[in-house]
Structure formats: structure tokens, C-alpha cells
Image (tube, grey):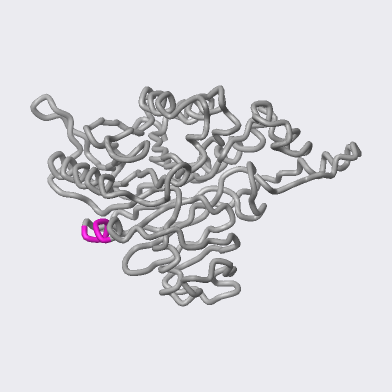
Amino acid sequence: MAGSAIIKGKYGSFVTVPAGEVRILQLTDIQIIDSDQMRRTDRLCTRERLKWTPDRVWDNAYRYVQEAIDAAQPHLIVITGDNVYGEFDDSGRQFRDFCDFFENLGIPWAPVFGNHDNETEFGVDRQCAYFESLPHCLFMRGDATGHGNYAVTLGTDLRISDGERSVPSAVRTLLMLDSHGCLTHPGIRPDQIALCQKALDEVRERCGTVPPLFACYHIPSDEFLRAAADAGYQHVDDAWAKYELGVTLPARNGDFGKRDDPQGRVGDNEAFLEFFKAAGGSGIFVGHYHKNCTSILSGGVRYTFGLKTGVYDYHNADMLGGTLITLDGSDNGFTVKHLYTRLKDDFWERLDRAGDGINNKSDTI
């Protein structure tokens, strides 16, 4: 939905949205692979090289993105990392195309880095600069550890007073954070928490108050395991637990989704979680595990794995699409719903029907 006014602050952006219902679309792990740019000839099997050629990016990724956008009609798009598989984009061509695709939508969009984005020889500095050069992209590098730590505040009734634009009626602030994990251990660092506090101080100064918070980052740490354990769905140390809420296990508190990807302990974000809850946080949205899409309420916070978008890298065909977060207009009310794709990926079937004898399909990226 085009037409939102965007005001850039020092620690984040302010975006105008209509009064009442506000829709946020989470996309995650789009993870575009350009097989023409692989560094080693043995990195991909023959079938993967054929499927992930650059002329197939629309089929593998962008048609799924467009379908989710058409269904959600969002006021804001958040992309929670692993946007382009950096190892397969040393030229930066796919990264720039990715940015241009979202920019041309005319919808405010807020990306964060995953653990594969910064593997490209194109370089993080150029990635950050390109993000920041685009008018609808809300990304800010920030002065904390990592690449991209910033806030996005949604508010109504944009006005101009005393020559300064302001967003007086804030309805939600999203903390967009780098969860690391590529070259360093996953987690939210103390200086990132300090930056979040500065961002919230800026929100209070501009808006008079700090609205309820969301946090968006790529790699979930142990709080997601604790949430599932506290709800009685699994033991906190059971990395291999598999279940589907409401199907193989009874769901509580409106929880939903499926866990089909091993997730072990990587460390906690206790300091960040304490800060987040004290500041009014109520929802955390992540990606990283392509076959996990649970959404679990625990301790006043809803912990959600976004639905993987597109068919790059490993995935379950019935667990693709986007995740719609709807603010209902009340003080802190919101709902979360997965938008499952109706598209079919029949590339392997068509390849098999062609009878080319290529059968070394793998799932090992």
C-alpha cells in the first residue's frame, strides 16, 4: 500500500499508517541463490545448478513474495534475514535486484541481516549503503555491534508544526536487530540494547510516549525453546522435538504452527528479553529455521517463527508463504496468521519428465 509518509530520525524511522487496523507482513529466508556465481564447481549438484540459475529468480522467490503482498496488502514489510545467500552473490547483482524489487513496490520495508547475507565479497559496507540509499527502505546501520540495528515506529496523523514533521500518535515500535551468527556467536549484544534504549528515547521525544514493542531479528535464541517448554510442548533441551500445534499436540493460548527443524540451544538473550518486556514488548518475530513456523505465547510475549518465503534452500513445500501481523487498533492488541502459498513448485517434476537422467537431487545447502 503506497503513500505512507516516512520521517527519518537518528535511531530509526517514523512511518504514518491509517487509524484502526494496521497490517505488517513478515517475509523471511528468501535466500536467493545464483548458481552462476558459485565459487566451487562442486558446491551444488547438477539439479540445483539448473534450478537456481539467475533467470529463475521470479519462479523461485519473487512470485511467492508478490503473492504474499497481494494477500496481506501491508502497510509495512519486515524481512527477517537471509535475504540473498551471500556466498552465491559475490558480484552483488542479486542483492541489488532484491533491493530494487522491494523498493519498486512503494511500500515501506525494513530488512535485517541473517547469517548468510554478509558472506558476499560484494561487502557489508556496500550492502548497508545501498539499503540506506533507497527512499522506502527503513534500514539504518546503527552504531552498535552488527550491521543494521534500528527502530521503526508506526503512527497516525502525520502533522507539520513549527516546521518539523512529527508522528504524534504512535501505535507500535519495531526493534530491527542483527542477531549475528555468521562470523560471531548468535545473540543480542549489550551495546545493541543500549542503542534500543536510545531509539525509544527518540520515540518518546517525538511522540510523547513509547508504544508497545515488537522485535524482529533472524536467529532465535533460547527464549524460543523456553517458551515452547513453558507451554508444555517439549522439553527445553529436546533439539529434535517435532510437532504441529492443534494437530499432533493440543494448542494453548491461540498458539499454532509446526516444528519440523532441529533447534538446539545457542545461548540466551535474557538481558535483551528483560529490557524488551520492561519497555512494553509483546511480540518477537524471527526466521532461520526453514521448517519451523510455530507461534507461541509465553510470559506476555508471542514468539513467532515467520513462514519461509520461496523455494531456495531446504524447505517443506507445505510451509511456504508469509506471515501477517495485524494491529487491531486497541492498546496492545494484535493477531498473527501465516499466509500459506497456493503456488506450486513443479521444477523437479518437469525435469524428471524431460528424461535427462539427472537424479542427483540434494538438500544439503
Q: Residue at x 44, y 65 (%)?
A: 296
Q: Is residue 73 visible?
A: no
Q: Is residue 22 left or right of residue 51?
A: left
Q: Residue at x 57, y 61 (%)?
A: 262
Q: Quadrant of the C terminus?
A: top right
Residue 138 at what x, y percent from top left?
A: 35, 33
Q: Nearer the viewer, residue 219 or 206?
A: 219
Q: Residue at x 40, y 36 (%)?
A: 109
Dividing the picture into quadrants, the one containing residue 212 is bottom left
Quick check: 101 above or below 71? above
Q: Residue at x 39, y 28 (%)?
A: 128
Magenta span: 274-278
Q: Is residue 248 left or right of residue 228?
A: right
Residue 171 at what x, y percent from top left?
A: 26, 48
Quick check: 329 above or below 62? below
Question: Is residue 144 covered in magenta?
Answer: no
Dividing the picture into quadrants, the one containing residue 201 is top left
Residue 203 at what x, y percent from top left?
A: 19, 42
In the displayed orientation, state which residue is furthest to the left: 162
Quick check: 208 above or below 43? below
Quick check: 170 above or below 117? below
Q: Is residue 107 left or right of residue 152?
A: right
Q: Nearer the viewer, residue 120 or 61?
A: 120
Main secondary structure type of the part rendered in magenta: helix
Total count of labels: 0
Q: Is residue 143 visible?
A: yes
Q: Quadrant of the N terminus?
A: top left
Residue 187 at what x, y percent from top left?
A: 38, 52
